[in-house]
Amino acid sequence: MNDLRLDAVSIALDGRTLLSLSARVEPGETLTVMGPSGSGKSSLLAYIGGFLAPDFHASGNVFAGDVEITALPAEARHAGLLFQDALLFPHMSVAANVAFALPASIKGRAARLERAEDALQDVDLAGYGDRDPATLSGGQKARVALARTLVSQPRMLLLDEPFSRLDAALRAQIRDLVFERAKAAKLPVILVTHDEADATAAGGTVVRIGGAS
């Protein structure tokens, strides 16, 4: 599996540099970027993923293994993303939500739904495929979002405070599941957060920006 390397990545807004960072994340490891709101944490993930808003000025290179991905369109970067909200499609079943992210190389509705059901089982949601997303709890939605991200066969996992909307007990449970699955898949992970407990659970290197203490 490939590592993820940030080479002199700098992001500025209105002439003010928000962050400047070089780092390397090995497969299965997590780099945590901590800082207050407005410090550029989410913008860093957007730059890596290929969807940074044009108001920002960014420079520097991002490598997934030997591939320089900042020259690629967002869909070719294969970044797996998890946000504060699960962002499930309300008009699709749980299994269809997961199947939507499967690579096009997996052909046929039955085969794709079978893969989706397998992925749901991997996040302890066996038998939930036919459910309406609206009937799920917050923790269950987070599990579906994780399954959907992993089946897309990403090169990396980018976590934008995905645990912040969960209560404390559920937060620890989902957090452990995400890091466990990422390590099993040997994915380099970048987590942005302002929560010390998230950083502790992630392990690995912690980078503090924007005056975070």
Image (cartoon, grey):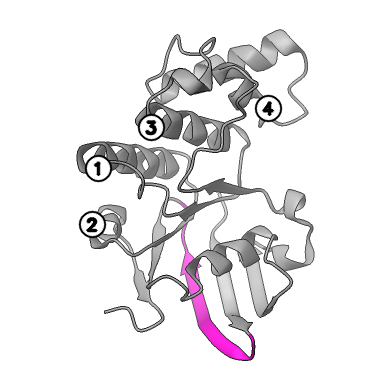
Whole-percent x, y for residue 137 in the image = 37, 26
Mark 1 or 3, closer to the camera: 3
Q: CA distance from mark 1 to mark 3?
A: 13 Å
Q: Depth check: give the residue in front, 165 or 23.
A: 165
What number is the disc on residue 100? 4
What number is the disc on residue 172? 1
Mark 2 or 3, closer to the camera: 3
The amino acid marked with disc number 2 is: Ala
Q: Depth check: give the residue in front, 204 or 21.
A: 21
Q: Depth check: give the residue in front, 71 or 165.
A: 165
Nearer-N-terminus badge (2/3): 3
Residue at numbered disc 2: 197
Whole-percent x, y for residue 37 in the image = 42, 70
* Image-based side of 166 in relation to 146, left or right: left
Dominant SS in magenta: strand
Which residue is located at x 77 percent, y 29 percent? 104
The amino acid marked with disc number 4 is: Phe
Magenta stretch in the rendered image: 14-27
Q: CA distance from mark 4 to mark 3?
A: 20 Å
What number is the disc on residue 138? 3
Local secondary structure at mark 4:
loop
Q: CA distance from mark 2 to mark 1?
A: 9 Å
Label 3: how many Cα within 10 Å (few below 14, some 14–19, many 20+): some
